[in-house]
Image (cartoon, coloured by chain):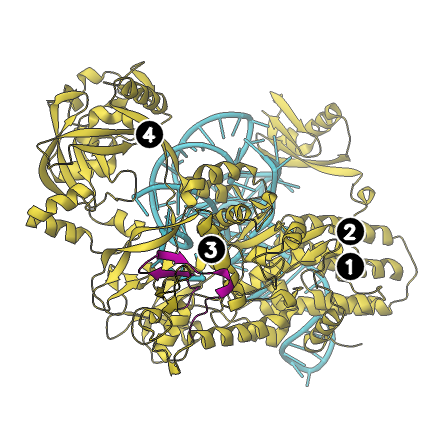
Amino acid sequence: MSRYDPSVIEPKWQAVWEESETFRAVRSDDKPKYYVLEMFPYPSGRIHIGHVRNYTMGDVIARYKLSTGHNVLHPMGFDAFGMPAENAAMASGGHPKDWTYSNIDTMVSQMKPLGFGLDWSRMFATCDPEYYGQQQALFLDMLEAGLVYRKNAVVNWDPVDMTVLANEQVIDGKGWRSGAEVERRELTQWFFKISDMSEELLDALDTLDDWPAKVKLMQANWIGKSRGLQFAFSTIDAPDGFDRIEVYTTRPDTLMGASFVGISPDHPLAKHLEKNNADLAAFNAECRKGGTTEEALEKAEKRGFDTGLRVRHPFDTAWELPVYVANFILMDYGTGAIFGCPAHDQRDLDFARKYDLPTPLVFTDLKLDDPEGFEIYTGGQVGGLPVTVNPDTGNVAFVPGKGERVRYLRGFAGDEVQTGDVAIDAAIEFCEENGVGHGVTKFRLRDWGLSRQRYWGCPIPVVHCDACGVVPEKKENLPIALPYDEDGKAIDFSIPGNPLDRHPSWRNCVCPSCGQPAKRETDTMDTFVDSSWYFARFTAPRAETPTDMADAEYWMNVDQYIGGIEHAILHLLYSRFFARAMHITGHLPERCKEPFNALFTQGMVTHAIYKTTGPDGRPVYHYPEDVELRDGKGFLKDGTEVEIIPSAKMSKSKNNVVDPVAIIQQYGADTARWFVLSDSPPERDVEWTASGAEAAARHLGRVYRIAAEVAEANEAANAEDDALLREMHKAIHDVTVGVESFGFNASIARLYAFTNALSKSKAGSDAKRQAAKTLAQLMSPMTPHLSEEIWALLGGEGLVANAPWPKADEAMLVEDTVTLPIQVNGKRRDEITVPKDMDTAEVEKLALATDGVKRALDGASPKKVIVVPGRIVNVVA
RNA sequence: GCGGGCGUGAUGGAAUGGUAGACAUAUCGGACUUAAAAUCCGAAGGCCUUGUGCCGUGUGGGUUCGAGUCCCACCGCCCGUACCA
């Protein structure tokens, strides 16, 4: 009997699949189509175990759908532009293009042995000029359709390296290479008008029935629809042109709790005032230091600068409020100005405490029955309102949910006790009636800035002409390709900044409009653009236009999209925007506006990070294989102890990536595939541990051995056959349910149980062969090579990959009797085995007669008996 | 800071509100073997007063005949936070 040897059978079956073009996707009307797509990888250099997990999940779906009679499209490509290629060139010479394509070659050669059922003929990388040229065409169409525009936006600026930094390159507010304190600087940038579609992108979430609720919720919160009041404070003795300060608030019901007005350091008024106020100029400059991330801004210490200006409260002209410049107010949100209500906003309260501002109360907790007598009102009056909050919790603002009922001490309309929601509506109505402002719906979603001041990206195909201004490039001149060298001399990537800017000749071009000499745009596109339409390109990857409508019509939508939860917001939202933009520009049918019918977000494979601090004070990350673990502590070979950061996302820059190639070489692809699917539920993060792969390999060897024995067995049919076949049908049912619901770990657990049943069964050879063939089929999406081998061994017809998926016989699934646990007061005391459809009253009688129940009741009579048919009996004593 | 999620034996995890720990890993015992590996069989949440006992799903409350599951609060960890991909 031959031994299970994956190194022989895996290449053999891969060759057969390739030869017979099993996974080639060809349009055909005689079968329903199915498009399954996993988020394509960045070519970081080597595949890691997270890739194996992600693509194996997609492959299980693809192979399952193939065997259920679908015409399957399952493509693969590379998201190939981005910073790591430039960083590699900066660190060790070479060229981003060479680095990227060499990585792609390596990763393809690592992926092919895994036996994925992919249509490799459709492969592309986003850095192929054939791809990004079409992206440039798409950009021009979007520009023409009014979906693209230019405006100023802030970037991280490294004042030493004189370059723009990505957020990732800003560490604790300092440039990663120079160590200089980063500044926020304004630059003219290209933008997609995604905010125009806020309402639609929000509303359409309701149609995405097969998306995880959490992703839809995250997107909804990100888009952030809010209804509020926009109004203006009139200023007192302000400079010309600043007689009003426009403010937007989502809590107009707290307007009577206003304590100060805050404006952004980038607000026009702040910029005007700083001209004649050196202290304010210094304060504003200080505020502009540090990174641009929302997190950095929110966590920064809240600081303000009293401009000395005052404004009048709209409802009490005698009530004056000071105007502060405050570092936590962003020009990008709302109007760049707020009013502070410290009593009911924690951030405002912190600010008010710091600058000794009053905290007027607007409403109180209903739990305070006697507000008049409570000492919280002992702080005096401002604008006719009590001032201090509860001294016991004087530094905690009272911030109830909008749906919570509170007692308004002075609202604008209606009942004194009402919910925030009702009060907000009433406040807006009242303000509108009194001419103080108007209700406005705003979205948090900002336009998508796509400009990047970097080399390794898709060039933005426009030209700057002295005479004509900004002019779109002509489509016949596409692709505008990246220059590989500087007119024969290697591009120097060791200098920070954008090589396109200092290239001797690439920028020079003629104006597409007037024909005079002009300069190319040197900004390249955000790599999110590349990944926002690749799924559509896969339907016709060699088309001379971004898409081919007939192919898009046939293959779109993506029926099942699979990828990491880390993409829940940006990538998926941008793709939804692009699908709409592609419809508007005639590149996708209208029904593709939501391009992903079903989404599955798989968990990440995490691994500890091992960190030490280098001589320059910067972190140094060590590979897992360089670290020895003893008693929960990690040591390098030279004995240095390393800091262990547990369970972090695998990231090349943190050196905590696990390479699956060794596992594949040692145990084979099927073991790796089986292993990454077993145990952990697909949606959950899994901490990688090296042990376990061997056990998976042992199991596959066992399956092969059992199948080989069955193939040679020769025993007559007997009474055991029925039990084995019942097990088989249950396995078919459970494994199918598992595969269809992304319960791959559950399917695998069921396959273990079925294998054990087959192994122990004394059934006849025919029944066993049928069971073993079914086992091979049920395993085939996960372990396709082993399954083909067993299928052939047992005389299966054709390839198991093409064999129709087995169907469970309903009649074989039902048992005649059922064992019911009997509880007394929720604790299990006994059990009874009864016919499955026994009458409830009969079950109750039997349950009460059991020893366990009698003992527990101790002669007392039960108060109540609950019988859940087929499930449980609970006796309430 | 804000938004979202997760938390169950030594370990990965299972469980439409209905017997908590399926299935597996590691461990221990047995068979086979000169021996080991492989293989096969079996044990196994904790506690003690060993009763058909009590306690057990991050912590504390609540709803329910019944809670790992639903609700509230808290703790810890993870993801995202618009220039990492």
How far apart are the alpha carbons under marks 2 and 4? Answer: 61 Å
Residue A569 spot, x, y in % from top left: 45, 48
Q: With respect to residue A618, does A736 lie above or below? A: above
Query: In the displayed structure, does residue A281 sit left or right of residue A20?
Result: left
Q: Which residue is mark 1?
A: A758
Distance (Cα) linking label 3 and label 4: 37 Å
Q: Is residue A481 magenta?
A: yes
The segment highlighted magenta reads A456-483
Rendered location of residue B59, percent (x, y): 39, 42
- The residue tagged 2 is A727
Q: Amino acid at mark 4?
A: Gly
Q: Are marks 3 and 4 on the same chain?
A: yes
Residue A169 visible at all: yes
Amino acid type at image mark 1: Leu
Residue sitting at x 30%, y 50% = A295
Q: Report which residue position mark 4 lands on.
A: A228
Q: Which chain is cyan?
A: B
Labels 4 and 1: the sequence-earlier one: 4
Q: Residue at (39%, 74%) from the top-left corner?
A: A88
Residue bearing the label numbered 3: A140
Q: Are marks 2 and 4 on the same chain?
A: yes
Q: Residues within 10 Å of mark 2 (few under 14, many from 20)?
A: many
Asked if the residue at tag 2 contacts the one at tag 1, i.e. Cβ–Cβ closer than 8 Å, the answer is yes
Q: Quadrant of the C terminus of chain A?
A: top right
**Vertical position of residue A370 compared to residue A354: above or below:** above
